[in-house]
Image: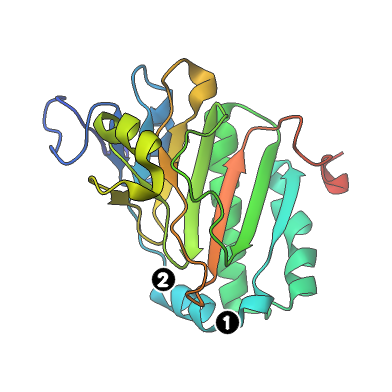
Amino acid sequence: MTGPSVSLEGGFAGAPAAFGAGIGTCDAAEGLAAIGNPGMEFVIWRRALPRRLQTWLERMDASCLPDLRVLVRPGDLRGAVEPHLDDCGMPPGDLRDLLLGDLDDLVSAFARIIQSDLVDVRLERVSHDACWKFHRDYVEARLLTTYRGPATEWVQPTDAGRALREQKSYKGPLERLQVHDVAIFKGNRTGPGSGIVHRSPPVAGTGCTRLLLCLNKPSAASPKPWPGGC
């Protein structure tokens, strides 16, 4: 039985030439652990969730999308999140269960990668230009995936300095994650110059509402651990 395939870009044998050094792609959640390899800055899991989940979320009234933050043990994710889904009016059923199952899987995978018993989970409803500036996150590692709306934009390391300087006037090469792609990347807390430069896609005034999952290690900014995990 073969394990997950991981392509390491930037001169490694057999790697596609699409991305620069320190950027990898994988075909399974286990491949995200390559972020721990020396020199790796960014790993993207290209995947597709069932189309019916995307259609369900796209057709849902934005007011029924969750906007929450919890600090949980992976095994407590469902218990911590389901009350928030009830409160915002997200309809129960198979598709909500499918979303919860995916959240559960990603939180568990991230916890293993960062070797932490707790994960800071943000599932955000975004209809404004949050984090519109090109920036590096002040974290050691972060996982992102977008369930609805346009996904995170980022630049190759060779274009990072220019994007940081020019910001809104930047017209250089720009990469975009796709909906449901899972990306894990290092931030600038891992060392000087480390961290992928990225931004949230501008959506203000478009009528678009995104649903974004962001996972982090616990920090001073995290909420208190969810009571079910104490």
Residue under label 2: 50
User: In which quadrant is the C terminus drawn?
Assistant: top right
Residue 60 is marked as: 1
Task: Specify which label sits upstream in the sequence, 2 or 1.
Answer: 2
Label 2 and label 1: CA atoms lie apart by 16 Å
Dot 2 crowding, Cα within 10 Å, few <14, some 14–19, many 20+: few
Q: Secondary structure at mark 1?
A: loop
Task: Give the residue at x 33% y 29%.
Answer: 161
| Res. 29 in view | no
Amino acid at pointer 2: Pro
In the image, taking residue 189 as reference, residue 90 lies left or right, namely right
Amino acid at pointer 1: Met
Task: Give the residue at x 68% y 66%.
Answer: 66
Dot 1 crowding, Cα within 10 Å, few <14, some 14–19, many 20+: few
Count of numbered circles in the view: 2
Measured as percent of width and height from the top left, residue 227 is found at 88, 46
Measured as percent of width and height from the top left, residue 144 is found at 50, 47
Which quarter of the figure has residue 60?
bottom right
Task: Give the residue at x 40% y 43%.
Answer: 167
> Do the CB atoms of the residues marked 2 and 1 lie less than 8 Å apart?
no
User: In which quadrant is the N terminus drawn?
Assistant: top left
| Res. 8 in view | yes
Measured as percent of width and height from the top left, residue 181 is found at 39, 54
Viewer-nearest residue: 176 or 207? 207
Colouring used for the render: rainbow
Viewer-nearest residue: 47 or 199? 199
Task: Give the residue at x 63% y 57%.
Answer: 123
Taking 1 as reference, is 177 above or below it? below
In the image, taking residue 85 as reference, residue 230 lies left or right, namely right
Residue 184 is marked as: none
